[in-house]
Amino acid sequence: MAAGFRFRDFVPEESTEKGFDSLFKIFMQLITITSGDVGEALSWLNELDKQYGLTDDGYGMGDFIEDLKKKGYIDEDPQEQGAFNITAKSEQTIRKSALEEIFGKLKKSGQGNHRTPHTGQGDEQSTDMREFRFGDSLDQISMTESIRNAQLNHGLGSGDFMLTEGDLEVRENEHKSQTSTVLMIDISHSMILYGEDRITPAKKVAMALAELVKQKYPKDFLDVIVFGNDAWQIEVKELPYLQVGPYHTNTVAGLELALDLLRKRKTPNKQIFMITDGKPTCLKEGNGYYKNAFGLDRKVVNKTLNLAAAARRLKVPITTFMIASDPYLQQFVQEFTEVNQGKAYYSSLKGLGHLIFEDYKRNRRKSV
C-alpha cells in the first residue's frame, strides 16, 4: 500500500516576527529620509502607528525597539543617554532594500564582470567552439569534442586510438570588461526646495547602484562624490546619512574631482553619472566663491563646458540625469552633452533608478 498524506486545517500561531518585519520595512524607509537619525525615524513611526494602527497589544513599539537592538540594527549612543545610532548591519540592509526597490530581485551569477563582444584570452568560457590554434592553453581544449572528432576522423576499428592536432577543438573564452564609474550627486539647496524631496531618491539610487556593483560586478570600481559649493568624495557607508546643505551648485568642482579619480583607475572603461536638478551657479576662486544664483552665468557655464570637452578627450562619457524640466535648463544640458558626446536623460524621480541601471549595464558592454 502506497504511503500517503493526511491533510487537515492548519492555523498558524501568531508570530511577533511578522510584526517586526512589517514595521522594519517602514523603519528602513524612514531612516533613509531622516538621513540616519534613529530618534526622528522612530518618532515618525510612532505617529504612523497612531494614525494607522501598525501595532497591537501583542506587539508594540517597545517590542520593536528591543528587537532592533537584539538583532543588531541599532545600538545605544555612548555620548547621549537614551539615543540610538544605526549599525553597519543597518547600512548594508538599507543598500539591499534600495536595490530590491529600484532594480528588483537580481539572480545570482558568477563573478560580476561585464561581457563584451570580443573573444580571446578572457576569463569565462562561452558556448562557441573553434579549431585549436597555436598559443591556445590546454585548459581551453574541450576533451569530449576533441575525442569525438578523433573517432570520426580516424575510425574505431584500427585498435589504436589516434588524436591529432586537427582533431582538437577549443572553447572560446569571453573577454569581460572592467569599469570605473564616478557617481556625482548634487546636494545643493534646490534638492529639497519647491515642495519636493529630491535628495532621498538620489540617495536610494546611489545605494542601490553601490550594492549592485558589489554583488554582481565585484571587479568594477564605483566612487561616489557630492557637490555643492565644493565637491568631496564620500564612502558608500555614508550614503544613508547624506543631507542637502545650504549650497550653490559647483558642477565644475564635481567634474574636476571625478576626472581626478578616474585618472587613477587603470580600467579600459570609465564614465561619470551626474544626478542634478539645477544649473551650475558657483565656482571656487582662491579662498572665496564666485556665485550667481540666477544661473547660466557665462563665466560658470564656459568652465563647465571646458571640463565636458576635457572629459571627452580622456574618453570619459558623462551621462547627466536631470531631474528638472525647465526648458532653459534642458538647453544647457543639451549643449553640455553635445560637447562631451555623452548622454542626457530628463527623468522624473520615479524612473531615475531604472534609467541609471540600464545605462550602467549598456555602458559596461563597451570597451574603449
Image: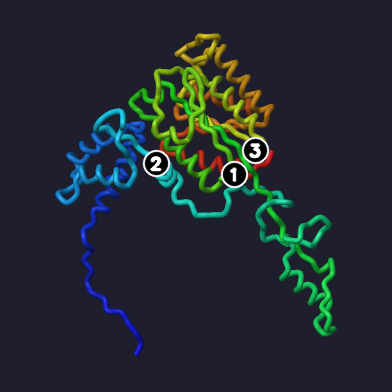
State which mark lies toward you, 1 or 3: 1
Residue drawn at 40 percent across, 18 percent down: 246
Residue 219 image label: 1
- The residue mark sitting in front, 2 or 3, is 2
Which residue is at the front of the view, 236 or 76? 76
Inspect this view and state whether residue 198 appears: yes
Residue 79's place in the image compared with 11, above or below, is above
User: Between disc 2 and disc 1, whose residue precedes?
Assistant: 2
Disc 3 marks a residue whose amino acid type is Asn
Question: Compared to 88, does 288 lie above or below?
Answer: above
Total tally of numbered discs in the picture = 3
Q: CA distance from mark 1 to mark 3?
A: 12 Å
Looking at the rendered structure, the kind of residue marked 2 is Ile
Tell me where residue 178 sits by quadrant: top right
Disc 2 and disc 3 in contact, CB within 8 angstroms: no
Rounded to the nearest angstrom, the CA distance separating label 2 from label 3 is 29 Å
Work out which residue is located at the far bottom of the displayed protein and give it: 1
Q: Looking at this view, is 294 or 106 the one in front? A: 106
Secondary structure beneath dot 1 equals loop
Q: Characterize the local packing of mark 3: few (<14), some (14-19) or many (20 or more) Cα atoms within 10 angstroms.
A: many
Give yes or no for contact between labels 1 and 3 (Cβ–Cβ under 8 Å).
no
Q: Position of residue 56 (x, y in %)?
A: 16, 48
Where is mark 3, residue-wise?
Answer: 269
Secondary element at tag 2: helix
Label 2, on which residue?
94
Which residue is depicted at the point 67% across and 58% down?
126
* Left or right of 200 in this view: 288: right
Residue that extends furthest to the front in the rendered view of this protein? 78
Q: Earlier in the sequence, mark 1 or mark 3?
A: 1
Q: Quadrant of the C terminus?
A: top right
